[in-house]
Image: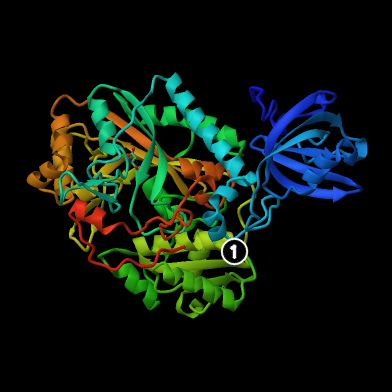
């Protein structure tokens, strides 16, 4: 419960906190005119402040001047009023309003500010154009959904701070003007005026600083950290976003997972959402990729993927046999049982397009018929045994639609993983309000970068690799090449989103150098870029590990909002611009000169 404001000439009460218990007393409130209704010779005004809304009533008999002033009130005017809190007559009670049992009969009013007519109504739930909302964000932020979002966001951060502080975590700030930290995205650069030609990078995460804090002996660190990644913005990404960043020393995976599960359980509770209690299930990366085609599985609906290659290995159907016989990269046939559905030809063509856009050469479809045979363009190419075996492997019944992709492992996984999500959206398969959380573990350390002929760290190159025999440099050297190393990573996945991810880190400089070498950095280059880390590791580095969670995504999830822009006070558009301030914007020639810079392009007109 809010404490009452200190009484001053503007107010002695919050609008949203007045209730039946205040009836009979006087109150003074301040706020914005949410709306005004004139009827029956009376004027009603809904007055809004951050706490909520209270109804004001103006009677002509309380003074002609006051009444005339009330008649001049328009939406978003700012006023301070004083009057008597009265119980509403029973027929007038508004059960939808926290203050709906009372109203203030105004005896006195001060007009504090007028307002132009807002470009959109602030007192209704109508769907508004997002560009318009972002352009007029100050007004948009007055709307209830935005207030609710920012209040919950605050509660999430507060819970994080309290839960972690209670467990001896220290909040430490790390620099914004820094050197590149690779998280796999492009850096935002800031030119240095004092050292012309040199640049700071904005941090993609505090990764290296938090590791240095562990080497420095701080043991348990966290930060509500702003991170910057210059990525091509996919639908729901922001160039700057907020992470809960956390690191611990002398720990293993279970220690970090345990702290974070308890923390997340507290956070999930704030949204009152229907989600499992910890401990959360852990699933290996390989299993997730096989069954869901992604390392961020959405398990709230079925449609799991099955590998049916073994049943088709001898097939005479060319498409299958050529894929299954290819050695490098190996091919597979994988399939989904989409269930009993009448899916018209046109929709099958659309689904084929979805699979193709996800990289597949095509999509095989088949309906299981009463006699166990298939209605499918490929039925005639398959033997009765093959059809029966695949039908059995997919646990399919007459009427079921089967969808299959024959391709490389990666393409088949991606195409069917994409198709699963498409089917769930088309057929509305996710029960409202249902949530699912799990850890993904046992990631490969690297993925092969064909273009540059080297390994890329799947998470980042500071995660500790493991080999079948152990984690030491000798174990890793004895293994079957870096492609066989796993990494000691864990991602927390919720409803198909990666909410957070982290790892046990490398604390042995020799292992760190092996990983740098695998990603194509020789010792000299590694030293130029990460010498400060290598040096720290040589001065007694404890075993350590950590994690980071996306706060924007967590708040959006708790509120059931589609877009993280709806839980950020001042977000950017998908093209990285801010319609409110006009950023990014051109700068003076003089500023460029001072920085020793010259622009090689004519700036595009600002996106507004
Ligand atoms: N720095 C990592 C990230 O931002 C998280 C971590 O490994 O702690 O994704």
Q: Position of residue 217 (x, y in %)?
A: 25, 21
Along the line of sight, the residue nearer the viewer: 424 or 170? 170
Q: Which quadrant of the figure has residue 367?
A: bottom right
Q: Residue at x 39, y 47 (%)?
A: 240
Q: Position of residue 539 (x, y in %)?
A: 14, 25
In screen coordinates, is 159 left or right of 65?
left
Would the CB of label 1 be found within 8 Å of ligand 1? Answer: no
Disc 1 residue crowd, few under 14, some 14–19, many 20+, Cα 10 Å: few
Along the line of sight, the residue nearer the viewer: 317 or 568? 568
**Which coloring applies here?**
rainbow
Q: Position of residue 7 (x, y in %)?
A: 66, 23
Q: For ligand 1, give the image quadrant.
A: top left
Q: Residue at x 43, y 22 (%)?
A: 165
Q: Residue at x 29, y 36 (%)?
A: 175
Which residue, given by chain and number where applicable, does mark 1 sit on? 426
Q: Which quadrant of the figure has residue 472?
A: top left
Q: Position of residue 188 (x, y in %)?
A: 29, 51
Asked if residue 127 is positioned above or below residue 512 in the image, the reply reads below
* Residue 71 makes an appearance in the image: yes
Asked if residue 424 is positioned above or below residue 605 in the image, the reply reads above
Q: Which quadrant of the figure has residue 56?
A: top right
Asked if residue 116 is positioned above or below residue 1 in the image, the reply reads below
* Residue 397 makes an appearance in the image: no
* Image quarter (top left, top right, bottom left or bottom right) of the N terminus: top right
Extreme residue in the front direction: 65
Q: Residue at x 66, y 55 (%)?
A: 117
SS at badge 1: helix
Extreme residue in the left direction: 524
């Amino acid at each position: 419960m809010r404490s009452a404001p200190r009484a001053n000439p503007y107010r002695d009460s919050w609008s949203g906190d007045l209730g039946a218990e205040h009836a009979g007393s006087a109150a003074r409130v301040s706020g914005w005119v949410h709306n005004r209704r004139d009827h029956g010779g009376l004027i009603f005004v809904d007055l809004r402040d951050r706490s909520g809304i209270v109804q004001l009533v103006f009677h002509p008999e309380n003074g002609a001047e006051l009444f005339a002033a009330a008649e001049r009130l328009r939406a978003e005017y700012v006023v301070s009023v004083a009057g008597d809190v009265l119980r509403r007559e029973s027929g007038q009670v508004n059960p939808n309003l926290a203050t709906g049992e009372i109203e203030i009969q105004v005896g006195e009013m001060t007009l504090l500010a007028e307002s132009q007519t807002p470009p959109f109504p602030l007192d209704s739930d109508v769907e508004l154009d997002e560009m318009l909302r972002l352009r007029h964000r100050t007004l948009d932020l007055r709307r209830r959904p935005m207030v609710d979002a920012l209040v919950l966001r605050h509660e999430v951060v507060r819970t994080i701070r309290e839960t972690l502080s209670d467990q001896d975590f220290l909040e430490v700030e790390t620099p914004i003007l820094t050197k590149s930290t690779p998280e796999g995205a492009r850096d935002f650069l800031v030119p240095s005026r004092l050292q012309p030609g040199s640049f700071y990078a904005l941090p993609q995460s505090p990764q290296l600083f938090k590791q240095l804090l562990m080497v420095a002996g701080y043991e348990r660190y966290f930060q509500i950290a702003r991170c910057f990644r210059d990525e091509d913005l996919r639908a729901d990404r922001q160039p700057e976003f907020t992470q809960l960043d956390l690191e611990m020393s002398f720990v293993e995976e279970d220690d970090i997972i345990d702290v974070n599960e308890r923390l997340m359980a507290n956070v999930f509770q704030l949204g009152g959402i229907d989600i499992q209690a910890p401990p959360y299930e852990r699933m290996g990366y390989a299993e997730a990729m096989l069954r869901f085609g992604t390392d961020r599985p959405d398990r709230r609906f079925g449609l799991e993927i099955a590998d049916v290659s073994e049943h088709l290995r001898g097939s005479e159907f060319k498409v299958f046999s050529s894929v299954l016989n290819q050695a490098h990269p190996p091919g597979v046939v994988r399939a989904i049982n989409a269930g009993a559905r009448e899916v018209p030809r046109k929709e099958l063509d659309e689904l084929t397009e979805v699979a193709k856009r996800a990289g597949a050469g095509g999509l095989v479809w088949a309906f299981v018929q009463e006699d166990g045979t298939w209605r499918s363009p490929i039925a005639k190419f398959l033997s009765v045994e093959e059809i029966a075996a695949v039908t059995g492997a997919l646990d399919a019944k007459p009427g079921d639609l089967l969808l299959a992709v024959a391709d490389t492992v990666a393409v088949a996984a991606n195409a069917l993983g994409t198709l699963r999500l498409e089917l769930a959206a088309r057929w509305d398969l996710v029960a409202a309000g249902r949530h699912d959380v799990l850890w993904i573990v046992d990631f490969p350390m690297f993925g092969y970068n064909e273009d540059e002929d080297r390994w890329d760290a799947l998470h980042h190159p500071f995660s500790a690799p493991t080999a079948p025999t152990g984690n030491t440099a000798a174990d890793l050297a004895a293994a079957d090449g870096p492609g066989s190393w796993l990494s000691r990573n864990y991602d927390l996945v919720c409803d198909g989103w990666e909410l957070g991810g982290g790892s046990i880190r490398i604390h042995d400089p020799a292992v760190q150098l092996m990983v740098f070498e695998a990603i194509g950095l020789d010792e000299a280059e590694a030293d130029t870029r990460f010498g400060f880390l290598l040096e720290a590791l040589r001065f007694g580095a404890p075993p350590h590990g950590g994690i980071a969670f996306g706060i924007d995504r967590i708040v959006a999830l708790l509120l059931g909002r589609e877009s993280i822009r709806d839980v950020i006070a001042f977000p950017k558009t998908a093209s990285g611009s801010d319609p409110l301030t006009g950023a990014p914007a051109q700068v003076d020639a003089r500023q460029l000169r001072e920085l020793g810079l010259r622009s090689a392009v004519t700036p595009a007109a600002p996106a507004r």
